[in-house]
Amino acid sequence: MKKTTFVITDDAIFMRTLLRKIIEQGENFEVLGEASNGREAIEAAKQHQPDILTLDITMPEMDGIQAVPEILKVSPKTKIIMVSAMGQQSMVIEAIKQGAKDFVVKPFEKSRVYQSISNVLAMDK
């Protein structure tokens, strides 16, 4: 069975590490790379063509909302899961309008992360 591949994007290394640990506990999940802002996320998406890319909304240089359409240009099959802090609902809605497929709220709940991953993977079927 083919592994589901990921790129994790967050400006906080702690959050990337936390999310990586959660994802890597999943069966057949593999994290190919990490990025700390929207520009790096675009490069990582271009390089790795991941199945799923997690994308923080608030980051320096280029935020998640600006990055969504650019990521989809370089890696059209990648499903984007937005990562937001509480109270960013309007930004999440904007990101979904731009092409993101789902979202998780910090602090992460492992069950919600897996739910979001299965939601976006089910979109292919």
Image (spheres, rainbow, N blue to C red):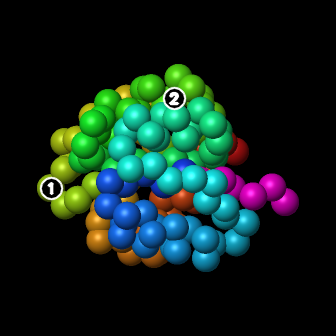
Residue 16 in the image, given as x and y percentages of width and height: 42, 63
**Label 2: how many Cα within 10 Å (few below 14, some 14–19, many 20+):** some
**Label 1: how many Cα within 10 Å (few below 14, some 14–19, many 20+):** few
Tell whether 60 sits left or right of 33.
left
- Region in magenta: 1-6
When asked about the image quadrant of residue 106, the answer is bottom left
Between the residue at mark 2 and the residue at mark 1, the CA separation in whole angstroms equals 25 Å
Residue 5 magenta: yes
Assign the N terminus to one quadrant of the image: bottom right
| Residue under label 1 | 87
Residue 80 in the image, given as x and y percentages of width and height: 48, 43
Going from the N terminus, do you reach mark 2 or mark 1 first?
Answer: 2
| Residue under label 2 | 72
Residue located at (56% from left, 26% from top): 74
- Name the secondary structure under disc 2: helix
The amino acid beneath tag 2 is Leu
Residue located at (32% from left, 61% from top): 12
Foreground mark, 2 or 1, reads 2
Closer to the camera, 13 or 91? 13
Assign the C terminus to one quadrant of the image: top right
